[in-house]
Image (spheres, rainbow, N blue to C red):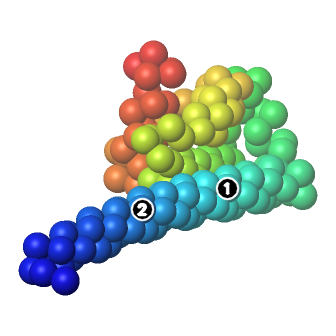
């Protein structure tokens, strides 16, 4: 065998090795992308599950506390609240603001290409529309909420038309 034949065999082996490496890297890249997408979906699902649990706890606090339910009905009817009722109403809605902001921020952060679930914002804005006194509380609290989730605050403001 001469040196030209050995060189040709070496080039062939090198080309096959490069081709095998490219195939291996493309497979690994595809698997990594799929794993990243699965992790993002899991994170989004976990955030949705946590937010549903938080919203359920918020609703449950009203269902289990007749005083809070009475205050909600009174506020919805436009009746004046005394100082203690205002405090309870404000605390109840502050809790909702932060639950919602955290939920949206987790959803937004875990979303791929920022395709996050806006249903939490729609539900939240619906609650605000049902409770005009809560809109006043929103205006007093929105900057603190914005620190938790800028995207939530901006989206709520847009939906409220403010």
Q: Secondary structure at mark 1?
A: helix
Query: x%, y% of residue 25?
Result: 38, 66
Front residue of 6/159: it is: 6
Q: Secondary structure at mark 2?
A: helix
Query: x%, y% of residue 113?
Result: 43, 41
Q: Residue at x 72, y 58 (%)?
A: 49
Residue 35: quarter of image:
bottom right
The answer to whether residue 92 shows anywhere in this view is yes
Q: Residue furthest bottom?
A: 1
In the image, is residue 127 above or below residue 19? above
- Tag nearer the camera, 2 or 1: 2
Crowd around label 1: few <14 · some 14–19 · many ≥20 (10 Å) = some
Q: Residue furthest front?
A: 1
Q: Earlier in the sequence, mark 2 or mark 1?
A: 2
Front residue of 137/86: it is: 137
In this figure, which residue is indicated by the disc labeled 2?
23
In this figure, which residue is indicated by the disc labeled 1?
45
Number of callouts = 2
The answer to whether residue 106 shows anywhere in this view is no
Query: x%, y% of residue 115?
Result: 50, 38
Q: Residue at x 42, y 62 (%)?
A: 23
Query: x%, y% of residue 88?
Result: 66, 53
Crowd around label 2: few <14 · some 14–19 · many ≥20 (10 Å) = few
Q: Quadrant of the C terminus?
A: top left
Front residue of 51/4: it is: 4
Would residue 10 appear left or right of 72 to someone viewing this image? left
In the image, is residue 86 above or below residue 148? above
Q: Residue at x 45, y 31 (%)?
A: 155
Front residue of 59/43: it is: 43
Q: CA distance from mark 2 to mark 1?
A: 33 Å
């Amino acid at each position: 065998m001469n040196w030209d034949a050995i060189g040709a065999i070496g080039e062939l082996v090198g080309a096959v090795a490069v081709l095998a490496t490219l195939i291996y890297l493309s497979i690994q890249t595809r698997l990594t992308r799929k794993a990243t997408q699965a992790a993002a979906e899991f994170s989004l699902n976990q955030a949705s599950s946590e937010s549903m649990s938080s919203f359920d706890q918020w609703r449950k606090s009203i269902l289990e506390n007749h005083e809070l339910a009475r205050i909600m009905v009174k506020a919805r009817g436009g009746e004046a609240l005394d100082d203690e009722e205002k405090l309870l109403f404000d605390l109840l809605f502050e809790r909702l603001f932060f639950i919602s902001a955290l939920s949206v921020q987790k959803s937004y952060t875990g979303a791929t290409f920022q395709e996050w679930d806006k249903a939490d914002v729609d539900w939240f804005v619906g609650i605000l529309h049902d409770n005009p006194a809560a809109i006043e509380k929103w205006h007093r609290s929105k900057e603190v909420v914005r620190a938790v989730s800028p995207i939530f605050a901006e989206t709520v403001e847009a939906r409220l038309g403010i």
